[in-house]
Every structure is written in structure tokens, then in C-alpha cells.
Amino acid sequence: MAQTNLALAERPAMPVIALDGITKTFPGVTALSKVALQLYPGQVTALVGENGAGKSTVVKILTGIYQPTDGQILVDGAPVHFATAHDAAAAGVTAIHQETVLFDELSVAENIFLGHAPRGRFGLIDWAEMRRRAAAILDEIGARLDPAAKLRDLGIANKHMVAIARALSIDARVVIMDEPTAALSHKEIQELYELVEKLKSQNKAILFISHKFDEIFRIADRYTVFRDGQFIGDGRIDAITKDELVHMMVGRDVSQIFPDRSKSLGDEVLAIADFSHPTEFADIGFTLRRGEILGFYGLVGAGRSEFMQALFGITRPASGRVQIAGKPATIRSPADAVANGIVYVPEDRGRQGAITALPIFQNVTLPSLHKTSRRGFLRLAEEFKLAREYTARLDLRAASLDTNVGNLSGGNQQKVVIAKWLATQPRVIILDEPTKGIDIGSKAAVHEFMAELAAQGLAVIMVSSEIPEILGMSDRVIVMREGRMVAELANDTLTPETLVRHAAGI
């Protein structure tokens, strides 16, 4: 096992910023308990842990959004207090979040310098200077963008580059990257790696948060592991294996990420024919049987999610026929889909899958109010009973079912959305990127639960961009490219190379 605390001689002389014995409590919950973290100049430190380990809380403490209940923050060895986000920024701490808030109606330069625009005489904004500085920052990170362009005219990846430029527009000494590759293509991820190397060469300390182990071992110099709000250990990344890191994260071995399944397929439950959309997809057709997991694979822009949204009635296809258990079905809305036994767990669970301002129990029971009401009146005990049943099956971790979904980690939010739809007792469940952004322990739990659903006769459609997940969970795989089905393959004939060749048109 790798050493979890290296000798001081193996470390740089002084961390740029350090957390020492940091504790953070909320009413009834201890989010962090005496944790430690050191970030060194010119090095990338990967902060690793399951959802709910305390990573997001640490980021909010480092950026001045939260103040610790106990412990201290040290900058260059001296204690500091970040009473506000402005204090943290003034100390050179900046963060690039997975979902940074940007403004579509403002220009690229305005988004970059929002809140700290350069000013000229009489305190007025110096527009020319702002555009000049924006152009210099964009050039520094290799983003070929016009500072005067409206953000609404940019794609997702370029918006992400604007978010990075915005974070670097202050004189940053510490750069926090929270799941920075979630919305990026393979090429853009490589460009991000180059940017990280450039930041390292500028002697900036980088905190890198990712659930993707290939990224962690590709980019990080050091690691720090949290579990259940506690510091577990740290060390050099080249002194630990992936298996050892997983064991530190979850406190147990996750030797089998994908469960063994005894496949017993039943009757045909869903048949799709001639599904087409004017701009997104064309000629989609397939069948699905009870107990089957059908994987959908493709590169960004292949049209998989767009087709699933049409099948669920969110958007209208130009043509298409649906049969449920051999009988024609008409789906013009999500309500029609649910009535026909089809449910959809979207990729963007925070915006499309849950009402984050409501508590867990209300989210879970929302599509099933007919089960928890009598004569038009909701029965609170019935709501809690239904929510408890399905969240327990998914091992949801929360202080109580009264907890607002917006206060949960990404993995637990995903479990709430899945529980919500399972409570409707569907025939077909569509899981769009079911383990995106969740940790390896939660992934194993979701995979195990998917296998249980299939074993109970539920038909599963799984959209995934992760090749190991496609290979490990699917009975069959449909590959899409540019809105069309280009291959339908049995799992026992699949290799990663086969998938990529079909998806890329090689």
C-alpha cells in the first residue's frame, strides 16, 4: 500500500495554500471533520473521494463561499480568513466549476471580466482595455475566440473556455478545476491537459477534481483522499495504484465494477420503427425484450439523447411508430410515455430530472401522487413510505428524506431521479449517461441495481459514452453516428476498437 503521508523532504518547502484541521458543520450534519489539504506551486493535486466525501464543501471553503466551523486556512504558511468570495479571489484563489454561471447576452470579454472590469477615468469601464486583456487571456489558453462575440453564439466547449478565461482573469495563484472535462470532447480534453501543463509552468498550484481515473493518473502529481468528510491520506500519484486509490476512497475493494448477470430475456416489450426528426436523427428502429439491457453508443453529436427525448415525448419526431407489448402506442408527451410504461432518466439530472428546491420525498413521489393520495388529499405518511422504499433500494445517502435534492451530491441526485421513476413501476427505463459525474463506488451501486432491474424483467435502454460501461453492462449495443444507426452488435462480439470504428466511421 502506498504511503499516505510522505516525508517532508519529498514535498516542496511550502504549500501555496493549506487546510489544517478544517471542520464544517451544518444543522444536524458534519460535512467535514478535521480534514487537511496542501496545494503546492507548479503541481497538480487530485482531490479524490466518493460523492458526499466533502469535496464540494472544501472547494466552497477555499473560495470563501463557506467559512469553516473549526480549523484554519494557511496562505504561504500564515493563517488567513476568507469572509467572502472576494477575499479568496484577492488571495489568488480561483475556481473553474463544472457548471459555471455565464451570461448568454453578454460578450465574451464581459463574461470574463464580470465584476472586475478595468476602469478608466471617472471610474467608467475601459471597454478597449477589457477587450485587449480578454484577447490576451484567450490567446494564453489557446482559445481562438473574438472577445466581442456574444456568448449565446458559442458552443458548449467554447463557453467552457470562456469560463476558464474568466477564472484566470484574476492574478490566480491557486486554480481549482472541478470536473473540468465533463462537457468536453476528446480533442478539447487534450487541449485542457496542455493548458494545465502551461499553468504548472507558471508555478500555479492546481486542485483537480475528477471521477475519471485515467485523467487523475494522466494529469496529477499528487493525490488527497477524503471519505465521509474525513481526510484519509495523501501522497505522490506515482506511488499508488488505481486499486489502492479506490480502496482508500470507498473503504472496501471494488474488484468487480460490473456485476455478473444471468441473462434470461423475456418477450418483446418495445418495438420502434422509422423514427426520424428533421434535424437530429433518421430511420431509427429496434426491438427490446424484458430483462434486456440495450446499450446506445456514439460520439458527441450522434443524436442518441435527442432520440431518447423524442421517444419519451419531450420533442416531436417527424415520423415514427411505437409498439408496447405488441400493441400500437401513441406518445405525444412525457405523460403519454409514463402511461405506457416508459420512463426517462436524463443526462442533465439537475435541470431536467429533479426539482432541486424540493425535498427528496416529494421528488420521488411526484409522478406517483395517485398512489399517495386519497380523495384528492396527499397522505404524508404514504409519501414517506413510498420514497423510503425506493431510496433504500438505491442506498441513497442523506440526512433525511426532508433534505432538499439541491443539497445532495451528484451521485445521490442521480439516485433520487432513478427512484422517482422506478416508483411508477415502468416496463422500460431509459438511462441517459447513468453514471456521468459520479464516483466509482456509486457507479458500482448503479450497475448492480441496473442488473437487478433487468433480472426482475424490466427492459433497460442505457445511453453511455463510457466504453467499459457499454461493454460491461449491455446485452446488445446500437452504435449511432450523425443521427443514424450504423451498427447493431451482440455484446459477445464487441471490442473497444469495434465500437470506436463504427462510431467514428472508420
Image: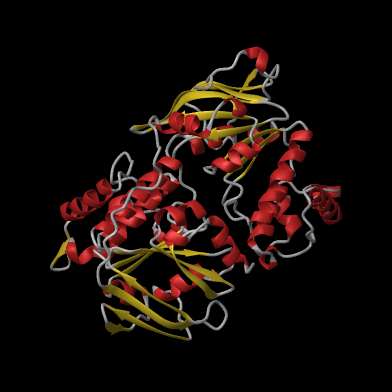
Task: Tell me if 385 is positioned left or right of 307 in this view.
Answer: left
> Does 194 appear above or below 344?
above
> Does 428 appear above or below 109?
below
- Residue 36 appears in the picture as rendered: no
Position of the C terminus by quadrant: bottom right
122, 250: nearer the viewer: 250
Question: Which residue sits at x=28%, y=71%?
Answer: 341
Task: Tell me if 313 is positioned left or right of 423 in this view.
Answer: right
> Does 490 appear above or below 249?
below
Question: Which residue sits at x=76%, y=49%?
Answer: 117
Rendered location of residue 213, percent (x, y): 55, 40
Rendered location of residue 140, percent (x, y): 81, 47
Among the 4 quarters of the image, the one containing residue 335: bottom left
- Residue 455 appears in the picture as rendered: yes
Give the farthest residue toward the front: 493
Rendered location of residue 437, percent (x, y): 49, 49
Q: How many marks?
A: 0
Task: Tell me if 269 is positioned left or right of 123 in this view.
Answer: left
Task: Tell me if 212 is positioned left or right of 24 in this view.
Answer: right
Colour pattern: secondary structure
> Does 9 appear above or below 266?
above
247, 69: nearer the viewer: 247
Rendered location of residue 69, percent (x, y): 46, 25
255, 71: nearer the viewer: 255
Give the farthest residue toward the left: 375
